[in-house]
């Protein structure tokens, strides 16, 4: 086998599958070998689909496609590991093994030819067989065919691979929408600031110059937009003119009278061909039916031959006898018998003879024999009753003996099993003792120097202690980081408040940021009391609060509460906390009393309880350890200290120190590598010894308690056998008595027809009747066969006539197509140019739309008419001059701005700040659109590449499948086509699929009946996969929705296509799997509830 480092030759087929503990296949199973057309059959629930799951599992497909919630669920019950190995046979005859193993922990291991490889390497080898697990191009599920709302675009995307861009496409589309939204918000803020600047009075000289520059920049920006928009419009006009010219030329061809007549004639011929094909198909179906009937007749002919052989055998058995019984004439066998003289039957017989009612010798013989038989029956009645009685008694005794023998065998087996089990325990314990001795000898042979052993153990002990400390530190770090993670919302709030401060001068700050304790010991208590103000912001007046609320509503950042300072200072509040805190800013004497109204801080829980529950002075009391008591009865505790200093740095420092020590110790340990290996080897062997000792079995011998019963049964069976011998002797004597009476009474009459016993006479009569029936049946079957063969000859003549007419029509169509093709070629060239211009026009339209959008939102121009009027005033300007001037004005604006923009609240500073932010957002939006358009282009290109190939393939495949036509050179009539209407990723059902079922016109896929729809969808999928045909296909009961006629068509298609590809089909329909090269039968063993396999090769290759 080839090594995994070599490149794999493309092409090959699946040879077999090796399973270990996979789903219902417990233990080891080998399924295969697979031929080019293999069917998997078996009852529902037997495990057929689990073979498909095994293939998809080995190819690395996700769990949902294997019908399990987790990959671990594919492991058989009670097992801890599963393995699926796919053995491929390459075109050069070599074998390649692809294996995926999975343990109970969910870890997968991939290997190629028993060498472990990475998943990337594994997938690369799989893809060399044109199998792509991500898009599952090798499998067709039953649900795909039966789905009433099948998504054709989704199927094309899956098989083409453009679906790989879908997630990125949607994410970039969402990102573009977010960027546009943010850009719109920034622009609104910028406009508000510009309006404020325009409304300013008494502008200083510096500010006046800034405003002039700002207006000049706006004018230049507007000019630049108008010039660029006009240039795009001019290009559009040129493209529209070219498109008009091309479409005019196309119309000249399509409206040409000769072209129209040829198109009509082609359409008429195609219709006639379709009708002839329908007639031919019906005749072929009839002849196929007759051929099947011929097969049945051949089987019957074989049966007839067997009957003839049976007849010959009977004739050989009876060659000493004539072909019929020769009855004696005028012989009286009754008159000499004295015992019959008083018989009524005898008198009636002679009466009939006298009156002439009995004439033929056979009638004489049969009547005389009946009289003698009546007498014979009377004579042997007593012997018959005795024989019957002996038989019944014999049967009862035999039944009793059989039951005893069964019990005897059962007890004897138990006795033997006890002996065998005991001996097995003894043997296994001896093996364990030998293994222990062997391990003990090996341990003694391991020579470890004592001083090196002590040093190594010291190093190992120290290393274990450091690792335990490292684990503890890591846990503490994770805990601290987890708590830090929960404060992300506080960071968002802090950033939002900072933005509000820069926008609105009346914003002072967050409540918790304005207060600090006088001593560190009050941290927890104050944090507990102000926790309810976690999202509260202090502002000067109501107007500022309303502006902030409106801003938060528009920007959708977060939710905040606002405390209006002018309202707080109008009232007086009482608090016991004023001596424990200070304010970072001067907010008035009443602010602390408002925040901590009716609140106090005490040292202990007991003091808090007394104050809150036995006095109405305070409504909230906090203890120094952070427990908050409220008069409502609510008690709050926990770590809410906002002033707590993080210990993360200290923990990280200690962790680094420990890691350094561990590294040093490991370096020291490397010097004792040999000792370590010896110690580990000894430990492993000691562990194995302990494990073996725990497995020793108890050797206490189990006593067999039914020995007496075993001896009793042996004696009773012996007695019964003696009794049966007596019965047999009595029965033999009775039979001999009956035989003697038969010869005495019936001997003479039977001898007259050449028979020596009554049984021989009856057998002779039955053989003669049977011989006559066989001869009659042979004649009937041969006559029917001749009639059917004549019918087949008539149908064959009809088919020859239809085929000749069809060939004539096709020849006419071919001649017309030759003259028609030059016009078609010219039309294709024109359509190609039109398509290229339309793509260019679409891009220009998108650019124009983008420019218009930015122009309308950034300037005072409202519509295209305003742009046109404004452009007349600046049409002599160029884009380069405007851009250069715009850069100069922007530099001058920055130089005239305040020196410290970030801390300046002037309108100029705000204008520059938001202009910069707007430009950044605009740049982000442009980049987002470019990135989105690039991915859209790649996705559309991948989709179209496969779609165009599908358009070429679909008619050929549908014709093969539905019409069973395999001559591609005569592909003169189109019976299926697909068209795309608009963007396939934004317009629902943009791909339309039309087919022409046999004997009908073109019908859209969705309007087809059930069977026709299934056949059309199969041809659609086959045509797509033909573009990159995989090494093999696996079909899961795709024939379920097909009627007998369509199953036969599918079978014919697969028989023909198996020359080019391998098909593995799960099927329950004999009309399909009877054509397969080999069958894999699956059944469920009721004893262990596991699936079992039977493989049968129908054909050899």
Image (cartoon, rainbow, N blue to C red):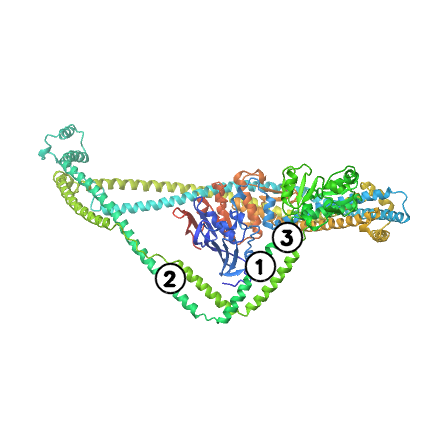
Q: Report the residue marked by disc 2.
A: 432
Q: Position of residue 505 (x, y in %)?
A: 80, 44
Q: Report the residue marked by disc 1.
A: 469
Mark 2 or 3, closer to the camera: 3
Quadrant where the image shows the C terminus: bottom left
Q: Nearer the viewer, residue 949 or 417?
A: 417
* Mark 2: secondary structure: helix
* Mark 3: secondary structure: helix
Q: Nearer the viewer, residue 1017 or 574?
A: 574
Q: Position of residue 993 (x, y in %)?
A: 60, 42
Q: Residues within 10 Å of mark 2 (few under 14, many from 20)?
A: some
Mark 2 or 1, closer to the camera: 1
**Looking at the image, is mark 2 or mark 3 earlier in the sequence?**
2
Dots 3 and 1: beta carbons under 8 Å? no
Residue at 31% of width from left, 58% of height from top? Answer: 423
Alpha carbon of mark 3 to alpha carbon of mark 1: how far? 18 Å
Q: Position of residue 942 (x, y in %)?
A: 64, 51
* Mark 1: secondary structure: helix
Give left or right: position of 709 versus 648.
Answer: left
Residue at 49% of width from left, 50% of height from top? Answer: 74
Q: Report the residue marked by disc 3.
A: 481
Q: Is residue 458 visible?
A: yes
Alpha carbon of mark 2 to alpha carbon of mark 1: how far? 41 Å
**Looking at the image, is mark 2 or mark 1 earlier in the sequence?**
2
Dots 2 and 3: beta carbons under 8 Å? no
Alpha carbon of mark 2 to alpha carbon of mark 3: how far? 53 Å
Q: Nearer the viewer, residue 297 or 370?
A: 370
Q: Nearer the viewer, residue 818 or 22?
A: 22
Give left or right: position of 161 versus 295.
Answer: right
């Amino acid at each position: 086998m080839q090594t995994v480092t070599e490149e794999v030759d493309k092409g090959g087929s699946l040879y077999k599958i090796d399973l270990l503990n996979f789903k219902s296949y417990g233990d080891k199973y080998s399924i295969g070998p697979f031929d080019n057309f293999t069917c998997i059959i078996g009852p529902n629930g037997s495990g057929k689909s689990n073979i498909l799951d095994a293939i998809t599992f080995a190819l690395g497909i996700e769990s949902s496609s294997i019908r399990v919630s987790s990959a671990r669920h594919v492991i058989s019950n009670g097992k801890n590991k599963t393995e699926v190995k796919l053995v491929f046979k390459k075109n050069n005859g070599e074998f390649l093994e692809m294996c995926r193993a999975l343990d109970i922990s969910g870890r997968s291991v991939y290997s190629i030819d028993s060498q472990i490889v990475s998943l990337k390497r594994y997938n690369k080898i799989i893809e060399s067989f044109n199998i792509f697990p991500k898009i599952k191009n090798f499998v067709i599920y039953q649900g795909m065919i039966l789905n009433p709302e099948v998504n054709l675009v989704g199927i094309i995307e899956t098989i083409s691979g453009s679906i790989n861009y879908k997630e990125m496409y949607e994410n970039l589309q969402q990102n573009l929408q977010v960027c546009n939204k943010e850009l719109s918000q920034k622009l609104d803020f910028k406009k508000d600031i510009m309006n404020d600047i325009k409304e300013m009075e008494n502008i200083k000289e510096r500010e006046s110059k800034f405003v002039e520059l700002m207006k000049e920049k706006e004018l230049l920006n507007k000019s630049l937009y108008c010039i660029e928009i006009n240039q795009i419009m001019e290009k559009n006009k040129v493209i529209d003119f070219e498109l008009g010219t091309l479409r005019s030329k196309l119309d000249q061809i399509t409206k040409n009278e000769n072209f129209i007549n040829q198109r009509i004639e082609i359409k008429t011929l195609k219709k006639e061909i379709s009708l002839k094909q329908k007639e031919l198909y019906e005749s072929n179906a009839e002849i196929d039916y007759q051929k099947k009937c011929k097969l049945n007749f051949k089987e019957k002919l074989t049966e007839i031959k067997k009957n003839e052989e049976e007849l010959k055998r009977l004739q050989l058995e009876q060659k000493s006898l004539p072909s019929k019984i020769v009855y004696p004439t005028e012989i009286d066998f009754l008159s000499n018998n004295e015992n019959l003289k008083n018989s009524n039957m005898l008198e009636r017989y002679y009466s009939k003879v006298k009156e002439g009612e009995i004439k033929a010798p056979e009638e004489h013989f049969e009547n005389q024999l009946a009289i003698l038989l009546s007498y014979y029956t009377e004579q042997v009645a007593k012997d018959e009753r005795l024989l019957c009685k002996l038989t019944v008694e014999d049967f009862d005794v035999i039944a009793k003996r059989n039951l005893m023998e069964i019990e005897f065998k059962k007890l004897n087996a138990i006795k033997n099993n006890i002996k065998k089990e005991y001996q097995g325990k003894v043997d296994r314990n001896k093996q364990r003792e030998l293994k222990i001795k062997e391990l003990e000898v090996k341990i003694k042979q391991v020579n470890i120097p004592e001083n090196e052993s002590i040093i190594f153990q010291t190093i190992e002990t120290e290393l274990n202690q450091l690792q335990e400390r490292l684990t503890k530190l890591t846990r503490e770090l994770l805990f601290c980081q987890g708590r830090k993670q929960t404060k992300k919302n506080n960071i968002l709030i802090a950033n939002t408040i900072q933005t509000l401060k820069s926008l609105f001068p009346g914003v002072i700050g967050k409540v918790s940021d304005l207060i600090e304790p006088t001593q560190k010991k009050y941290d927890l208590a104050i944090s507990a009391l102000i926790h309810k103000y976690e999202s509260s912001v202090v502002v000067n007046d109501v107007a500022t609060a309303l502006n902030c609320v409106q801003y938060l509503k528009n920007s959708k950042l977060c939710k905040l509460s606002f405390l209006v300072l002018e309202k707080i200072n109008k009232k007086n509040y009482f608090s016991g906390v004023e001596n424990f805190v200070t304010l970072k800013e001067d907010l008035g004497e009443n602010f602390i009393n408002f925040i901590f109204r009716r609140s106090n801080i005490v040292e202990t829980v007991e003091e808090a309880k007394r104050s809150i529950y036995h006095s109405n002075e305070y409504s909230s009391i906090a203890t120094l350890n952070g427990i908050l008591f409220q008069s409502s009865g609510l008690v709050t505790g926990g770590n809410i200290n906002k002033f707590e200093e993080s210990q993360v740095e200290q923990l990280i420092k200690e962790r680094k120190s420990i890691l350094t020590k561990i590294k040093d110790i490991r370096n020291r340990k490397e010097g004792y590598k040999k000792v370590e290996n010896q110690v580990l080897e000894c430990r492993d062997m000691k562990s194995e010894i302990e494990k073996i000792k725990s497995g020793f079995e108890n050797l206490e011998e189990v006593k067999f308690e039914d020995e007496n019963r075993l001896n009793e049964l042996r004696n009773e069976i012996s007695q019964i056998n003696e009794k049966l011998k007596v019965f047999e002797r009595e029965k033999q004597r009775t039979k001999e008595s009956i035989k003697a009476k038969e010869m005495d009474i019936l001997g003479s009459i039977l001898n007259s027809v050449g028979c020596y016993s009554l049984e021989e006479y009856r057998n002779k009569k039955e053989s003669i009747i049977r011989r006559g029936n066989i001869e009659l049946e042979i004649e009937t079957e041969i006559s029917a066969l001749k009639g059917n063969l004549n019918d087949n000859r008539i149908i064959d003549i009809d088919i020859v006539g239809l085929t000749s007419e069809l060939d004539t029509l096709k020849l006419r169509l071919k001649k017309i197509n030759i003259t028609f093709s030059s016009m078609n070629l010219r039309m294709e060239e024109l359509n190609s140019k039109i398509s290229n211009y339309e793509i260019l026009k679409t891009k220009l339209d998108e650019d124009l739309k983008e420019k218009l959008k930015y122009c309308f939102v950034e300037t005072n121009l409202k519509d295209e008419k305003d742009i046109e009027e404004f452009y007349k005033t600046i049409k002599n300007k160029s884009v380069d001059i405007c851009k250069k001037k715009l850069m100069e004005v922007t530099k001058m604006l920055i130089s005239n701005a305040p020196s410290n923009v970030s801390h300046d609240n002037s309108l100029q500073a705000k204008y520059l700040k938001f202009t910069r932010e707007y430009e950044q957002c605009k740049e982000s939006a442009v980049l987002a659109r470019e990135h989105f358009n690039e991915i859209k282009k790649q996705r559309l290109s991948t989709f179209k590449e496969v779609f165009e190939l599908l358009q070429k393939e679909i008619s050929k495949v549908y014709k093969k499948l539905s019409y069973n036509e395999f001559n591609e050179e005569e592909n003169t009539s189109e019976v299926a086509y697909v068209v795309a209407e608009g963007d396939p990723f934004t317009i629902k059902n943009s791909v339309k699929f039309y087919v022409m079922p046999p004997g009908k016109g073109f019908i859209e896929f969705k309007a087809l009946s059930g069977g026709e729809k299934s056949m059309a969808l199969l041809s659609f999928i086959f045509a797509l996969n033909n573009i990159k045909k995989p090494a093999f296909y696996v079909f899961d009961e795709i024939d379920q929705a097909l009627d007998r006629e369509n199953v036969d068509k599918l079978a014919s298609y697969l028989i023909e296509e198996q020359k080019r590809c391998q098909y593995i089909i799960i099927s329950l329909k004999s009309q399909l799997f009877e054509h397969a090269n080999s069958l894999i039968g699956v059944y469920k063993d009721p004893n262990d509830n596991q699936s079992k396999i039977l493989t049968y090769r129908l054909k050899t290759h």
